[in-house]
Amino acid sequence: MRSFVREKQIDCGKHYKEVDIFPYTEDQQNAAAKKKRAKKSKESPPKQKNLNDKNACRYFIQLMHLNFEYEPGALHISLTYSPKYLPETMEDAEKEAGKYIRRLKYMRKKEGLPPLKYILVTACTMKKKSDKPVRIHHHLVINGGLDRDAAEELWRRPRRKGQKQGDRIGYCNADRLQAEEDGIGALSHYLVKQAGGKKRWSSSHNLKRPSSRTNDRKYTRRQVEKWAKQKPDCTFWEKRYPGWTLTNEDYGAQYEYNELTGWSIYLKLKRKE
């Protein structure tokens, strides 16, 4: 079975994109041609919604860059639980977070703000010798417009008779997203790589989806193997992708070897200033 090298560029906005350079077979190409897909196509969401899954992690980071990196006033909200209101399962926690999201939507509508856009991560550590989750908490990234104090005040239980306000569910902190050297990359990698435990994510349906293009004539297997072994620096990749550079010297370029297919390269690129 003949194979060749495919380059796939995944566009995630004006300031960030990813590039896959990998072996591809004629059978795969013929199967794709039968679907009659356009040259530029939307990336499909992964089947897994678990951030321990490699494909889910990549798509999560792409969405973060595309939708929130340069969103004015975007917030990162951290939500925890007091012992009194700590959920017993991840599912119960996600239901509680869903109620909070509905309150955010209502407040935005009341204040005449654009519809809520969000990515929610629910994380926990697991108790040793059991499947019971502990330290369940949430991270929520939302579009701008809402005051931070207002967002924090919504993390409460429904008001009971005689109460002016419902009980606080736990700690809530809302911070504005800051443009860093790696854009929103630092936050994205923090959410993906929290030490241990389970991490599940979900998002609103109104997020922009990354798009991609493929090129099957740009590189050869011999070139890819040579580069994978040499691990060239930023300057090398800047010449091949003018106007772009690696997001980071350490993890901006990754090289993997498969005994059946050979070498592949995965690049994370940011727009040069």
Image (cartoon, rainbow, N blue to C red):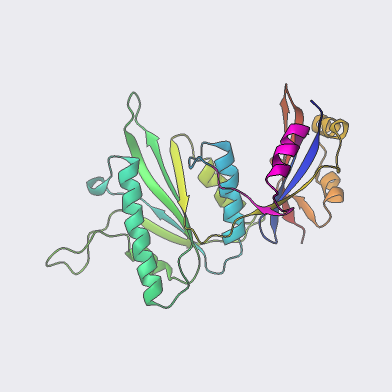
- Residue 37 inside the magenta-drawn segment: yes
Q: Position of residue 69 (x, y in %)?
A: 60, 60
> Residue drawn at (28%, 54%), measured in percent from left and top?
169
Instruction: Name the residue furthest bottom.
Output: 112
Q: Position of residue 132 (x, y in %)?
A: 31, 32
Taking depth in this image into account, of 162 and 267 the one nearest to the observer is: 267
Quarter of the figure with the C terminus: bottom right
Instruction: Name the residue furthest left.
Output: 162
Quarter of the figure with the N terminus: top right
Q: From the viewer's perspective, is residue 215 above or below residue 23?
A: below
Q: How many marks?
A: 0
**Range of the magenta residues?**
22-46
Residue 226 in the figure: left or right of residue 93: right
> Residue drawn at (42%, 78%), measured in percent from left and top?
112
Residue 188 in the figure: left or right of residue 130: right
Q: Position of residue 242 (x, y in %)?
A: 84, 55
Taking depth in this image into account, of 151 and 265 the one nearest to the observer is: 265
Instruction: Name the residue furthest front.
Output: 34
Is residue 271 visible to us here? yes
Instruction: Name the residue furthest top.
Output: 259
Is residue 25 visible to us here? no
- Residue 272 inside the magenta-drawn segment: no
Q: Position of residue 10 (x, y in %)?
A: 69, 50
> Residue drawn at (55%, 51%), measured in percent from left and top?
187
Residue 268 in the figure: left or right of residue 83: right
Residue 55 in the figure: left or right of residue 203: right
